[in-house]
Image: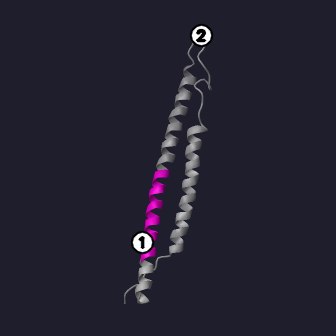
Amino acid sequence: MAEQYRVDLSALEETIRKLNGILKDLGNAHADSRYKTSMSPNALGADAAGASFIEARKLTNAHTDMKNAIESIVGHLHDVTDKFGTKTRKVHGNYQNQEADTAANMSGS
């Protein structure tokens, strides 16, 4: 006996909806990491006449490195989620079309 498979289109629609929500949140996180985590070069201290504040420079550089890493990670997550969403929408459309074709064939249209 042949096994029958059924695709739950509403589950795919729910997945797409959730992915769109994630993409929105990632867009906000990307903007926040880019624009709301900036720090002026002298925020942690500045060189004085004849003296260098090496620790402040190191902290500022570490902050910049971490900021760039977070931006990169959030950007990557956005790209992966967007690709998955695009593929999910395509699969949903294909199954929806197949379902419509099957219904039309069974009704003799």
SS assignment at label 1: helix
Q: Which mark is residue 38?
A: none
Label 2 Cα crowd, 10 Å radius (few <14 / some 14-19 / many 20+): few
Q: Residue furthest left?
A: 1
Image side of residue 45 versus residue 67, left or right: right
Outermost residue on the top side: it is 50
Label 1 packing within 10 angstroms: few (<14), some (14-19), many (20+): few
Mark 2 vs mark 1, foreground winner is: 1
Q: Quadrant of the N terminus?
A: bottom left
Give the residue at mark 1: 94
Q: Is residue 81 magenta?
A: yes
SS for dot 2: loop
Image coordinates of residue 48 in percent, x first then y, are 60, 13
Above or below — where is 109 with respect to 82?
Answer: below
Colour scheme in use: one colour
Residue 50 rendering spot, x and y as whole percentages: 57, 9
Dot 2 or dot 1: first in sequence order is 2
Q: Which residues are magenta?
A: 78-97
**Is residue 44 found left or right of 68 in the rendered image?**
right
Q: Amino acid at mark 1?
A: Asn
Apparent side of residue 46 relative to residue 90 in the rendered image (left or right)? right
Q: Residue at x 45, y 60 (%)?
A: 86
Of all residues shown, which one is farthest toward the front? Answer: 109
Give the image location of residue 85, x and y in percent. Answer: 48, 60
Check disc 2 and report the residue beneath it. 49
> Marks 2 and 1, how far apart in space?
69 Å
Name the one closer to the observer, 99 or 49: 99
- At horizontal 62% and vertical 22% (from top left) the residue drawn is 45
Specify the quadrant that holds the C terminus: bottom left
Taking the spot 41% from the left edge, 77% from the top edge, the residue there is: 98
| Residue drawn at the location 60% of the way across and 37% of the way down | 37
